[in-house]
Amino acid sequence: MEIFLQQLINGVTLGSIYGLIAIGYTMVFGIIGMVNFAHGDVFMLSAFIALLLLLLLTQMLGLAAAPAFVVALVASMALTALWNFAIERVAYRRLRGSFRLAPLISAIGMSTFLANFVTVTQGPNNKSIPPMWDQVIAITSGGAYDVTLSYKQILIVAVTGALLAAFWFVVQKTPLGRAQRACEQDAKMAALLGVDVNRTVALTFVIGAALAAVAGSLYLLQYGVVKSSDGFVPGVKAFTAAVLGGIGSLPGAVLGGLLIGLIETMWGQYFGSDYKDVAAFSVLAITLIFMPSGLMGRPDVEKV
Amino acid sequence: MPAERFVRALREAGWATLVVAGLSFPIIAYRAEPDFNNLLALQPRWPLFWQFCAAAFLLRFLLAFWSGDETKAKAPREKNWPKLPWLGPLALVFLTIYPLAVVALLGPQAALKWVDTYGVQILIYVLLGWGLNITVGLAGLLDLGYAAFYAVGAYAYALLAPATGLGFWALLPVCGLLAAFWGFCIGFPILRLRGDYLAIVTLAFAEIVRIVLINWDVVTHGEAGLFGFPGLNFFGLPFIPGPRGFAAHFGLPFQGIQKQIFLYYLVLVLALLANLVSLRLRRLPLGRAWEALREDEIACRALGLDTRNIKLTAFALGAFFAGIAGCLFALRQGFVSPSAFTFSESALILAIVVLGGGGSQLGVAVAAVFLVGASELLRELTFLKSVFGENFDPAQYRMLLVGLAMVAMMNFRPRGLVSTRAPTIKLGATS
């Protein structure tokens, strides 16, 4: 029971990070209908940017760990957003009217480029930082196993919840959100009615990247290690989360993320960690085959 | 107005430089490496950073200055490559004499690398490219898990050869059929999905196959892989020194390269067979149906084509050639391990097809030679090491460039670099 509770906490933490990445997939898919395959690598890149900034601030400017992390997080959001803005401009914008697989192939190329770009510039090996904020709250004690909840985990879940609420508000209530939903329904009509489609799509990519950067920084904080091949598997899992929650739906993405995080940690606990990725990939295949609209999505009607 | 254009180009270049500076600020300007205490320390690389900024400024400036003249209307330019009917036969003649010529020129020792790395390895990729071309180029099904079928072929040979005692002539079709069967099994449930979902599911299946290969220690020996399985023989004559070997039987002196030359011709013949099959199939109703499916699936269904069966044959046939290529890979390496069948392998094969301009046989072959051969060639150039430092590894840059090339292809020539991917027949075409 204690172990189950502990894995529940770990799963929700991991799931929150997947959820934050999944929002980026789901928003881009919603607005231009493409699978942004490079998004996982954008997440990895953001973790690297945060890592470098953190080292820069603590080693060269002598800041304490906590303010340095906050500054690194915010700066990483800005720089990753710039990256995704440039990526959209270079790799996807011209392809909106092309044949349907073109954006996906371009995104695969971009993903390959980003992973190898980081490998070339930063080396292929693990980069680990010393652990930060290790205080924990003991939830149960005296049993066979002490269940603990660390401050970091509380922070991660709280940040995810707050960001989900904020972006839910943005999409539902602000002019930007209205423009996004208009482009989602019919980009040509939205353009005729005076919505700047290019700007709206670019902003969607920027927001997605900023959220991925939050996820990347929190991932670095929680697990303390990142490497250049870390974009692929978390990326596919976050995409699984987006699909499971219903692609195009913001709360669905976070729900899907939580489910994938829980499935992965529980599988690792009770069936061994060798095949825990198989569990996530199987969920992806099964969802797409049997339930392509996911838990909270709308059914996808193919138009001629 | 040159002055106005100059100012505008300058402004454009300034913005581009700012963006590049932002993109490369921490990731290029600093590198994090563990120091003696195993703590990460930053190594500054500001010169590299300034070089990137300067390059961005110059490129953007020149581009903006030259293309900024908007008084000249841009004519739509669709340049088609000239048709070169003699190129195919010429390439064939070259490929046939290539290993013998290399041996004659360089001697058997020095020629080994040229036959093995540049000959056999590239031809295996050509075969893989032609196989995937059936699925991606002809039928328009994006398969991101092609390396899984390649792995099935390689492991089928590595496991079955010692277990059954059969030679590779018997196992070659078995490897192909097993991979085709896997293609059928994986393809069956997913073929009604829309294009990009199908691509993602094939990726998921390929990763599952790879994880199983890593963890199913009893059969696959995990990461360590399989080795020591029987190698190639010439219709029953093994390539060994001594009286029972190939060399002694034909009264030749024994040389290690004989095996490689035989493997080369074997791969060449099989690759040409794959080429022939897909060229012939394109003219059959099945091939026509593939192309029609690629162009418009809904129209196909409206015309009463059985899209599921048509997709399944494309998927299984593509997988069949991957299985054959896997078997040849196992024979070439004498060793198979899961690390050879990662997603980046699938991405490389996909890049070969995409750069070759999906649907074009010659284009795929040229792309394979270019992508695989060029990076091997870069490894040879030792002066690059003196320019870029001792640990310069072109293999790392290969995938980086492959990624960029895929993006550039999709943006500038989505129908192929070497040739254009046109349907074989087209309504209203004048011939």
Image (cartoon, coloured by chain):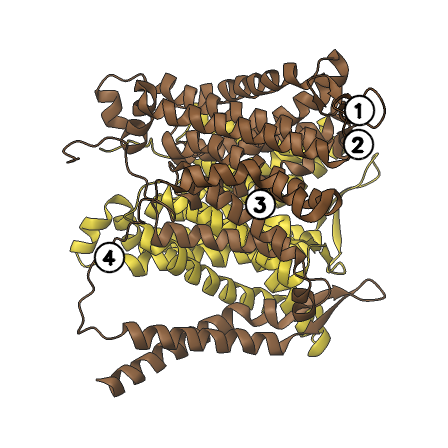
Chain colours: A yellow, B brown
Q: For the residue labelled by badge 4, is the local secondary structure a helix, a strand or a loop? A: loop
Q: Residues within 10 Å of mark 4 (few under 14, many from 20)?
A: few
Left or right: where A300 falls relative to B214 = left
Dot label at residue B248 = 1
State the separation of the CA atoms marked 1 and 2: 7 Å
Above or below residue B88? Residue B74 is: below
* Chain under numbered label 4: B
Q: Which residue is mark 3?
A: A232
Nearest to viewer (mark 1 / mark 3): 1
Residue at image coords 71%, 42%: B112
Q: Nearer the viewer, residue A280 or B389?
A: B389
Q: Residue type at mark 2?
A: Phe
For the residues labelled 4 and 1, say whether their Cβ atoms are less than 8 Å apart.
Answer: no
Q: Which residue is mark 2?
A: B254
Q: Residue furthest bottom?
A: B3
For the residues labelled 1 and 2, say whether their Cβ atoms are less than 8 Å apart.
Answer: yes
Residue B129 locus on image (x, y percent): 49, 36
Nearest to viewer (mark 2 / mark 3): 2
Nearest to viewer (mark 2 / mark 4): 2
Residue A246 locus on image (x, y percent): 42, 36
Q: Which residue is mark 4?
A: B77
